[in-house]
Image: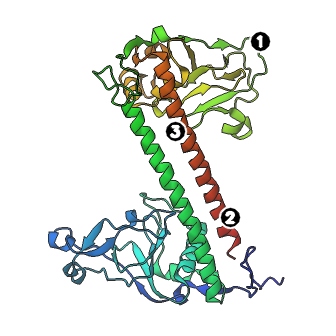
Amino acid sequence: MPENVKKPAIRFAGFDDAWEQRKVENIAERFYGGGTPSTLNSQFWIGEIPWIQSSDLTENELFDVAPRKHISSQAIAASATKVVPKDSIAIITRVGVGKLAFMPYSYTSSQDFLSLSGLKMDGIFTTYALYRKLQSELHIVQGTSIKGITKEELLAKVIMAPNQTTEQRQIGAFLQNLDHLITLHQRKYDKLVSVKKSMLEKMFPKNGSDIPEIRFSGFTDPWEQREFSEVTYSSGEKNRDNLPYESYSITNERGFVPQDVQFENGGTMKEADKRMYYIVTPNSFAYNPARINVGSIGYQNLSKNVIVSSLYEVFKSTELLDDRFLWHWFKTDGFQKLIEQLQEGGVRLYFYYDKLCMCSIKVPRVEEQRRISKLLDNLDNLITLHQRKLEKLKNVKKSMLERMFV
């Protein structure tokens, strides 16, 4: 194929024409700036005309902008903002530069926007084409002071597009359907995360109570308070023989993670002497005392011994505690408050195992602990399932944006 013939790697059947260059200034009939009405006049802000600002747009949501503010016709007459016709594309040119959205309703905007109206190509396709172009060329950082883009610079940019509107519509519809799937799984994921958070709040007793708000039927006994020195014990042993166990780190998101995965080329400790490392046997807990305040704790259920840095604290629970019950309790606000109360240090705060032993936990009978653990584990599995589906769909979309455009 000659270099001057441009075609995408993936294409719908029946289309073979080369794509052509289109300057942004040539893909719309009109361009609108924006403005902010005076906040001193309250009458300006009680109207029914949508007014969007940069914080109303998110980086990956291109078609569902919900303005938080509305203005009156008097506000429009007294400011630089203008009513933009529906089916226009709003592009942020200042803070958050490059974020954009297709607007299916008429609206006004702040001075952070340039809007493209009277589109000469399919609006959905044009939105994705501009999104891909600006994502690749502009560094988007929301909420920080960064260089914007002038109207002249934006209008001079070039995108590639097919001549046939039918092909444009098919590409736009395909990607929009993919976005609908992503949104669906995102909502399911967010809902499950919210349910898990609610269960953590309601399935453990609040301060001053020995009975949780939600409980399985058949359990009525009050929960008992136990000291951590009674229900856990330090279990880390130094790897004095320098055994070739795999080195692990602990993250706040994934728990135990091999250092080869967590750090490029295994990190700085790959070739270090591991005799001072702690051996972590299965069914152990470990955490970094300087990072447990951000949830950096892990439960080792790998069915093998591993080693962690000597900076970590390693412990196990006694038969009075179900491990998974304790694992979920570590994710509650109650545990977070204990860390805040007892951590010590100067510039960096630490929460060592001896501080944990100063804490107490309310627990039911082990049978009830296991029922609670199973429910919360099932929720975690569902959350992980939707998270993986979400990541897969996002990767598919990224690939399609690269291969369906020139």
Rendered residue at 31%/65% (across/down)? 68
Q: What whole-number distance in Å separates the C-alpha atoms at marks 3 and 2?
A: 30 Å
Numbered circle sitting on residue 379: 3
Q: Is residue 246 left or right of residue 150?
A: right
Q: What whole-number distance in Å separates the C-alpha atoms at marks 1 and 2?
A: 48 Å
Q: Where is residue 315 in the image (x, y as percent from the top left)?
A: 56, 16
Decide which of tag 3 and tag 2 comes sooner along the chain.
Answer: 3
- Determine the secondary structure under disc 1: loop
Numbered circle sitting on residue 399: 2
Rendered residue at 61%/73% (across/down)? 174
- Determine the secondary structure under disc 2: helix
Q: Where is residue 384 in the image (x, y as percent from the top left)?
A: 58, 43
Image: 41 above or below 344: below
Residue at the disc numbered 1: 241
Question: Label 1: how many residues lie within 10 Å, few (<14), some (14-19) or many (20+)?
Answer: few
Q: Position of residue 205 (x, y in %)?
A: 35, 25
Asked whether the viewer can see residue 66, the reply is yes
Q: In this view, does 377 lie to the left or right of 91?
A: right
Q: Is residue 301 left or right of residue 193?
A: right
Rendered residue at 38%/80% (across/down)? 33
Q: Please state which amino acid type lies under the numbered disc 3.
A: Leu
Q: Please state which amino acid type lies under the numbered disc 2.
A: Ser
Rendered residue at 43%/57% (across/down)? 144
Q: Is residue 52 left or right of residue 351?
A: left
Asked whether the viewer can see residue 267, the reply is no
